[in-house]
Amino acid sequence: MTIPSKYDASKVEDKWYDYWMKNNYFHSTPDEREPYTIVIPPPNVTGVLHMGHMLNNTIQDVLIRRARLLGKNACWVPGTDHASIATEAKVVAKLKEQGISKNDITREEFLQHAFDWKNEYGGKILEQLKKLGASCDWERTAFTMDPEMSESVIKVFVDLYNKGLIYRGYRMVNWDPEAKTTLSDEEVIHEERQGNLYYLEYKIEDSNDTLTIATTRPETIFGDTAICINPNDERFVHLKGKKAIVPLCGRIIPIIEDEYVDLEFGTGCLKVTPAHDENDKNLGDKHNLEVIDIFNDDASLNSLGLHYEGKDRFVVRKEIAKELEEKGILIKTEVHTNKVGTSERTKAVIEPKLSDQWFLKMKDLAKPAIDAVLGDDTDINLVPKKFENTYRHWMENVRDWNISRQLWWGQQIPAYYFGDAKEDFVVAENIEKALELAKEKTKNDQLTANNLRQDTDALDTWFSSWLWPMSVFDGIRNPENEEIKYYYPTNDLVTGPDILFFWVARMIIAGYEYKGEKPFNNVYLTGLVRDKQRRKMSKSLGNSPDALKLIEKFGADGVRVGLLLSAPAGNDILFDEDLCQQGKGFANKIWNAFRLIKGWEVDENLAQPETAKIGLAWYDAKFNKALAEIEDHFSKYRLSDALMTIYKLIMDDFSSWLLEIVKPGYQQPIDKNTFDKIIKVLENNLKVLHPFMPFLTEEIWQYITDRTPEEALIVAKYPQQKEFDAQIIADFEVATDVVSGIRTIRKEKNISFKDAVELFVIDNDKQSKFFDVVIQKLTNTSAINYISEKVDGASFRVKSNEYFVPISKENIDVEAEIKKLSAELKRAQGFLVGIQKKLSNERFVSNAPENVIALERKKEADTLAKIETIISSLNSLK
């Protein structure tokens, strides 16, 4: 086979991905091997590949490919989340373009449109993951609205309801007026925003008196049902027992007393609007106040808003402020900063709203999940540990979960109503079972399915994805099936810390409730991908590169390396395209090293040179040391460090040193023994690198020799860790310093590599001579002579040893050399004066720690030796 002169990722990646797919390497079925399982954090079905997905899925692919090489039965389950709010919004928008309103069609028709949309666009992100090299078991691809997944969700709802953990309650909830649905507390993002504090004057009934309240929301005065003062506030004693008149609408409302009112804030008088503020609702319940809801579902004002009916709340805020000012009711306005709740999905400002909703009691359910992560004998390991505090805070302060959403896209709540009373409903897995229960509850055998109407709300998306590690293996419907028993609990979960509570904690809760054990062993929390200016990547900032264009430009392997080199666990990633360029450069370096090896002519009759034998012995030790480091890094989820260890091993030790040591002379053949061993070394390098750069490594692996599908790199055997000689590694470090010293002299003195030099050594360190022949080959040194006295020539030091290379005056510019050495001497002498001044200072010597003084004395000794060497070199030139 002719090896191309350049590595072209665009020609290689599809070829090998198709080959892996064709040979079914990604598919897993239970067998006698140890399972290694990862379930993908299912991306939204509306999504496209962004930098966060790229990082997250690269890490998962590295872990799964490594497990495969280690001989484990690797199973990576892919899938997508139906993303109820986001997808419903997309479908509604698409229908609108076609002139169809959601309100004009049935739920079934809408769902058909939604599934059509999902089938057309929903698999896009999974196809993009293939471009990245993700080796998921695509035969297992799941979707949170698949029939069997939905059946599992409904089964769990019914079970939790029957256990008394799910209930229906009329509560103040977070209302998203754009999506027209409730949100759980965790889906609300609190942002500091600058607004105004409006001071409004209310008249007192049957009096000329007035009182002033301060509010950030003047548009809500139509919902006021009381004014509250603090009973201890002497300023308002005269108002006790009186009534106030709400501006514009003229409603008479009581003035109530409660110590809840902060004497210091605003005016000390508080307007109470129970329908639109949770604290006001609590006050209203305590004082039996009327509840007046002034908003429509889209946060426009309803008929109670009088002449503002139909207008958006923010439009009304501006207009009502103007009207109140014109009528002398608005006394003043102050700039005021407060926290505003916004929808995580739509970014709309949340409206507190009283509503009948379904809730799940969380406190008792959460207890096993707290112990699993934070107990003395923890079952689940969070990486990095710093997120344990965040987890603790959330879980110990957990509130009941609002699980109902006013949407159609999602699992419909399995509650069936048969009457108008609050308790006239049953909960069942289907309408047939519901009818049986309804007949039983009503004692009415004449009921039919037509008498039942199912709750129109859908379940929160997270209520399906919290079952993900179980439901993908059908562990809810068939808890004793072979797959759930084999693959569960899964091994590693890789996700972002932003969904630590939304998803991770809830999966742990569900795991203990339905399997009696953890859903995974380890949770690897990645950082956020930011740009070089530390800004979070987003479409609005225009700082998020197109993932597929990056792959096109740098190759999938280059992008993977670029992402991972900058991705320490849990810390934010400062993404820089230069790192992808570095990844691409690394691929080219490996390719060129491979081409160099394959370009050597092999002679079976040649004996193996001593240099090659020594070089291979050193690299074997170096490789096994690196293997131990890689293993340690993986055990701590330091994938960035593991990759850097491999990078240095291949770039420095293999390419820069080993290949130089073993390569034959110009136009000379290499012996077969060395060649075979170099190929073996290369193959081992490819094995450890494969999880990080799968395409490049498979391409080279298949070029090395003809392979059967069973011999593909993706299913090769990972190198086994062996004992290694640490001394040979340490001795080689010294040898490389010697080589560098000789090369520096050659460069500085302009001595061609073709001209052999001689080396003289004063061996004060009694260094090993094991690498002498290697030093000679790498520097074209004719002989290494061990001496006791200095000789004339250029010199350098390595540790305590002195090395001399005799220089012929004919070969160098004596005048320029004297000038350069004189400058060096002057610098060294100046440095020595500074050190000796410090050491002659009694105050410094008596107060400084011993190790500091020892360091200064070493600097003095080294500098004196350097000066002596320079003077010796100068004398040899005179």
Image (cartoon, rainbow, N blue to C red):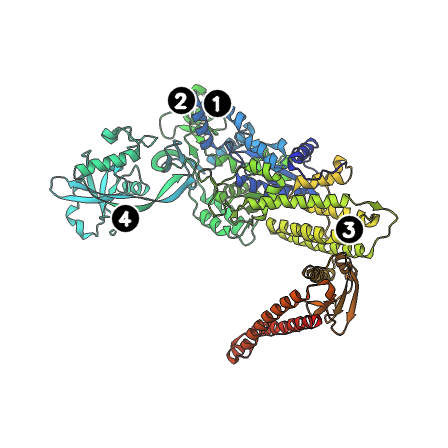
Amino acid type, label 2: Ser
Mark number for residue 260?
Answer: 4
Q: Position of residue 532 (x, y in %)?
A: 50, 47
Mark before the other along the chain sequence, 2 or 3: 2
Q: Position of residue 756 (x, y in %)?
A: 78, 60
Q: Mark 3 and mark 1 in contact (Cβ < 8 Å)?
A: no
Mark before the other along the chain sequence, 1 or 4: 1
Place residue 585 in its image quadrant. top right
Amino acid type, label 4: Tyr
Split into 4 quadrants, where in the image is the C terminus? bottom right
Give the camera-side residue of 60 and 645. Answer: 645
For disc 3, the marked residue is: 663
Is residue 211 among the parts visible in the rendering?
yes
Residue 408 falls left or right of residue 647: left
Q: CA distance from mark 4 to mark 3?
A: 84 Å
Q: Residues within 10 Å of mark 1 (few under 14, many from 20)?
A: some
Mark number for residue 113?
Answer: 1
